[in-house]
Amino acid sequence: MSTEAKASKYWNPRFETAGREEIRELQLRKLKGLVKWAYGNSPLWQEKFEGAGIKPEDIRTLDDLRLIPFLTRDELTQTQNVNPPFGKILSVPPQKAVRYHQTSGSSGKMPLKILDGWKDWEWVSEMWCYGMYAFGVRPHDIVYIAYGYGNFIGFWGAHYAAEKIGALTIPSGGLTSEDRIKKIIDIGATVLVCTPTYAIRLGQVAAEMGIDLKSQSKIRLLIHAGEPGANVPSTKRMLTEIWGAKVGDFPGMSETGGSTSYECDAQCGGIHIIEDHYIQEVIDSEGRALGYEEKGELVLTSFGRATIPIIRYRTGDLVERVPYNTCSCGRTFDLYRGGVLGRADDMKIIRGVNIFPSAVENIVRKFDGIVEFQIVLFKLNGIDQVKVQVELKDNMDLQSQQKIIRNLSQELYDANRLKFIVEQTPAGTLPKFELKAKRLKDLRDQ
């Protein structure tokens, strides 16, 4: 980090405040280099380019990006199945890699195997630095990473970014929730990095221990990734109430190199795109480009990962792009309003109604008495049904419990014009999560 950056609110002021034309020129220069590298070194990309009838020299403008065919998750899965273990996407021999990770598999699909070289990994942590610094992490902070440190790329990048910023960085792999809470308080941690689900779980465990995290911990920033939640208004309010801290949303994915966008400390209701390191397109279901304030699927081209070239990757994430001046922070990077709004493959159709789990969560989290929840889809007499199972605080009287069930049922109906079955489950029966929460069970094929 330069002296200029240390005195600035920007990690990389040179490009975070660059003019829009300068950003586009940089993207084009990097795109030409990436395309040439991928075509010359990755067998999968050579096949895709030749199948589309194009050569690297055909990419002369940013608009020419659309000549390149999309890359999909199914393609990556197939190439790793047919050519195990890493497929034909690699652009260097696997012996050159220094990092192995895999996707979480939370979507029910086979985890993808990901390799990174030294330069790749340095870039992954740099992307986290953009966001963490923008949100307010500084060298005087104590950053606590509440994460299991396994093969899932998860918060590995955040760990190294915190060190790069100069903050004291505390790992917590293998500790129980109780031990993590004690350590957070004992060392005076000021930043907590974990999934939003796990931050809520820590709050529940702390309450059982008789600890008020808002008054007894020094946590001032919550940095969340790995799943929706930090962008869901009611969940964000719940986290703020539990910890008394500012809550930030940091989306990303293993395939594209971790963090791809971030929420700055201005918190304007959107997340900044890291435009000097990615080209991010928004498309409709037919693959056509969409403009500002049009909701569609996010497509990513990543400039920092040479070992596995990622060009025009269909993420499945649903976003709505808005101009950079939507935020007052001074960055010239465009944003996604409301963060990642959901996933195309998360949407479920129940009797003609589109249901998104994140929208259900936004309603459920309004009720302070709900400890955990789960969405279950099933068939009854051949007709699709949706049920929300809820676990309530065990110190509530029967009347209060019934009121929550009744009001939640009504709010879900009002929002969707669809009857939801709301079912109370005994305390401790619903699963608790440290990493990505899996709160949707689709039993309609069973």
Image (tube, grey):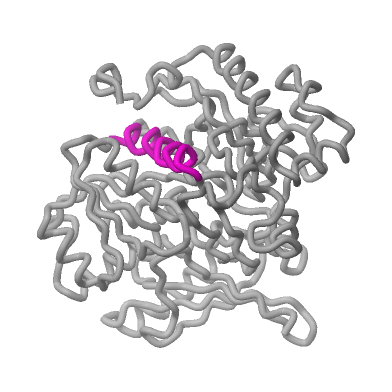
Q: Does residue 380 appear to the left or right of 212 in the view shown?
A: right
Q: Position of residue 170 (x, y in %)?
A: 22, 54
Above or below, comparing residue 202 to residue 52 in the picture = below
Query: Residue at horizontal 65%, vertical 61%?
Result: 355
Q: Quadrant of the N terminus?
A: top left
Q: Nearer the viewer, residue 83 or 321?
A: 83
Q: Residue 78: within the magenta?
A: no
Pick the front one: 39 or 406: 39
233 or 436, which is in the foreground?
Answer: 436
Q: Position of residue 337 (x, y in %)?
A: 53, 37
Indicate yes or no whether the magenta region holds residue 129.
yes
Rendered location of residue 443, percent (x, y): 67, 80
In this image, 373 relative to 290: left or right? Answer: left
Q: Is residue 48 left or right of residue 299?
A: right
82 vs 39: above or below: below
Q: Which residues are magenta?
A: 117-136
Percent of width and height locating residue 360:
54, 62
Front residue of 440 and 152? 152
Res. 214 image quadrant: bottom left
Classified by dominant secondary structure, the portion drawn in magenta counts as helix
Q: Which residue is at a point 19% across and 41% down the rendered structure image?
A: 141
**Quarter of the rendering occupied by the C terminus:** bottom right
Residue at the spot 56% in from the left edge and 54% down from the top edge: 114
